[in-house]
Structure formats: C-alpha cells, structure tokens
C-alpha cells in the first residue's frame, strides 16, 4: 500500500468527500552515490551555518524568505499548514471540461485518491460515477508542499486520479521555435499519414516500450561486480544528415513498420484526392461543350442555316 502523502477532502458543490492521496507512479531508475575516486570514500553534502561556520543538524534548519541581504523572514511549517487558503485541506472543484481541451504540456505528476473511511465511500462513488457518465474531467485547486496547485480529476480503472496541472502562465510560447518555410506535397503528407497508420498501437506494451537504458546499466553493473568484460554497445546505423528523397524514405519506413508487425506486401501509394471543380471552370467547360455541339450541327447541315417553313 503506497504511503499517504496528503489527506483532506474533495469539495464538489456542497458535497464533501474525505480522501487520502497516494502517489500513482514509481521510479525504477538506478541511482548513484558520490564517491572519492582516490580511495572510494563516500562523499556527502554537509550543511553549514555561514555565521557560526559549523555544521548544523536537521532539527536546527528552518525555512526563510530573503527580504534583503541583511534580513530573512522566517516561515515555519505550521504557518505553511495554516495559510488562509480555502484549498489548504481541500481539493476544491471549480469547473468540468472535456479532457481533450487540456494541453498535455500542463499535465504533471499523478496521484490516486482513495476514500478516507466508510463515511466517504458513498460520496466518493457518486463523484466517480458522475465523472464517468459525464465524459468530462474536473478542474480543481489544492494546496500542497508550500504552494497552491491546479489539479485535474479523472477516473482510471475505477479510481479517481488527481493530476497536478501547471498554471497556464507556466507554459512557454513556442513562437521562437517555428520551423523555416518549406514546401511539402500532398503525396508526401499522404505517405507520412500511412506511416502513422502502420505504427499505430492500442497499448503501450511490448519490448519497444521497456526501459532499455536501465537494463543496459544493470548489465554493466553486474559485469563489473563479476569482473567480466563490459557488454559491447551495438554499432549505430550510419545515416546521412540530409534526406535526398523524402518520398522514397517514407515508403521505406512504411515497409519496415509493416514488416516489424508481420504485415506483408509493399506500402500502397496513396492517390492524390480528385481536384475540386470550381464554378468558373465548370462554366468554361459547359461553354466548350456547347460550342462543340454547334460545330457538330453545322457539319451535319453542310454549314447552312436550316430554312424555316
């Protein structure tokens, strides 16, 4: 059972749902310590007081805001817990929106919310089922770790999840990174779409979605522990820095993607969509057909006007 990192309540209108918050993710990366290369001694970071020039214990360290170079405003943990915020002990829902309306750049770490006791079971299930039926996500505010955060509540596998959202003004504009002008043909776009189709999957499972870096690092650590030769890295595929034939490269990519999935047959070439006939072009075509029809009639009558009776 994950450790509870925060407890409070979801505020849903006048409905209150007592909840506990647990982390929804875990880190499997290999971590390192710092060592002195000369003798293998552990290198540690020690905390010193500038004024007393001595190492201080953890229970002597507090938080403070530097108002000026010669004045610090101390802030205690209790003062942070008792900030005059309605979100200090509540996840306060403010709106409901479609999930597609949220920019993925805003979504940060995620947490599972569990009902805190039997009394919370019914309102928790009510909110869970209402969210599922509405096909929307809730946008809320909550205060944690010394700051107020924006949050997104959604349903995952029968549990309410809370994702931390970055505030809109925390997302940088990409306008400085716009690519230079370039012409791309419809055929190239169609081929790129076919490559996307051939690489589409329903789930992020399989060998291509494993953490190969951690696996390789474990092999290196094990080899060094056993005094064996280090595993050799595969030779990288040499690629030129310039794509000479984009269409041929796309077709080759499609064929490789199909082959990796066991699909047979070469990539089909997409035909360009039929051109739309404009009103002006249609009028011009009708006039040409009418002129051709008159020419045929004149030829039939020997070029003379037919006599009226």
Image (cartoon, helix red, strand yellow):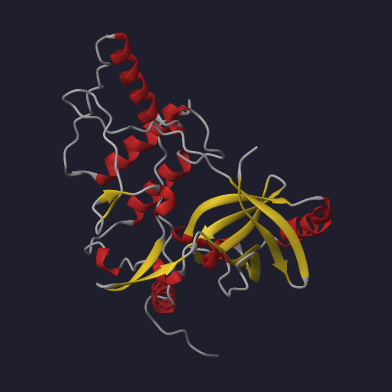
Residue found at x 41% / y 48%? 58
Asked if one can make out residue 149 in the rendered structure from this viewpoint, the answer is no
195 up-or-down from 63: above or below: above
Residue at 28% from the left image edge and 15% from the top image edge = 224
Q: List x then y, in percent, for residue 64.
A: 38, 66
Q: Residue at x 59, y 73 (%)?
A: 85
100 horizontally vs 258: left or right: right
Q: Nearer the viewer, residue 94 or 265?
A: 94
Q: Residue furthest bottom?
A: 309
Q: From the viewer's perspective, is 171 left or right of 35?
A: right
Q: Nearer the viewer, residue 284 or 252?
A: 252
Please give left or right for residue 81 compared with residue 188 in the image. right
Q: Is residue 96 above or below residue 268?
A: below
Residue 138 drawn at (x, y percent): 64, 64
Using the image, determine if residue 23 lies above or below residue 209: below
Quarter of the rendering containing residue 186: bottom left
Q: Which quadrant does the N terminus fall into? A: top right
């Amino acid at each position: 059972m994950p450790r509870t990192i925060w407890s409070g309540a979801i505020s849903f209108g006048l409905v209150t749902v007592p909840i506990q918050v647990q982390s929804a993710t875990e880190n499997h990366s290999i971590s390192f310590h710092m060592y002195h290369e000369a003798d293998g001694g552990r290198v540690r970071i020690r905390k010193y007081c500038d004024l007393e020039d001595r190492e201080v214990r953890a229970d002597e360290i507090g938080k403070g805001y530097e108002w000026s170079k010669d004045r610090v405003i101390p802030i205690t943990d209790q003062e942070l817990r008792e900030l005059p915020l309605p979100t200090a002990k509540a996840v306060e829902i403010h709106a409901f929106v479609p999930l597609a309306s949220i920019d993925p750049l805003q979504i940060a770490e995620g947490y599972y919310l569990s009902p805190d006791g039997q009394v919370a079971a019914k309102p928790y299930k009510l909110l869970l089922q209402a969210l599922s039926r509405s096909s929307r996500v809730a946008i809320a505010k909550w205060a944690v770790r010394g700051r107020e955060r924006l949050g997104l509540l959604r349903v995952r596998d029968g549990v309410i999840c809370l994702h931390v959202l970055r505030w809109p003004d925390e997302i940088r504009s990409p306008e400085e990174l716009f690519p230079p002008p370039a012409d791309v043909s419809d055929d190239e776009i169609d081929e790129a779409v076919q490559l996307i189709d051939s690489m589409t999957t329903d789930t992020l499972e399989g060998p291509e979605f494993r953490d190969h870096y951690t696996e390789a690092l474990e092999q290196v650590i094990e080899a060094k522990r056993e005094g064996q030769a280090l595993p050799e890295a595969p030779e990288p595929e040499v690629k030129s820095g310039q794509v000479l034939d984009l269409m041929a490269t796309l077709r080759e990519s499609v064929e490789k993607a199909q082959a990796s999935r066991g699909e047979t047959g070469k990539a089909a070439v997409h035909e360009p969509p039929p051109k739309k006939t404009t009103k002006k072009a249609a009028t011009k075509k009708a006039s040409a057909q009418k002129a051709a029809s008159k020419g045929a009639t004149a030829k039939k009558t020997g070029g003379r006007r037919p006599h009226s009776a």
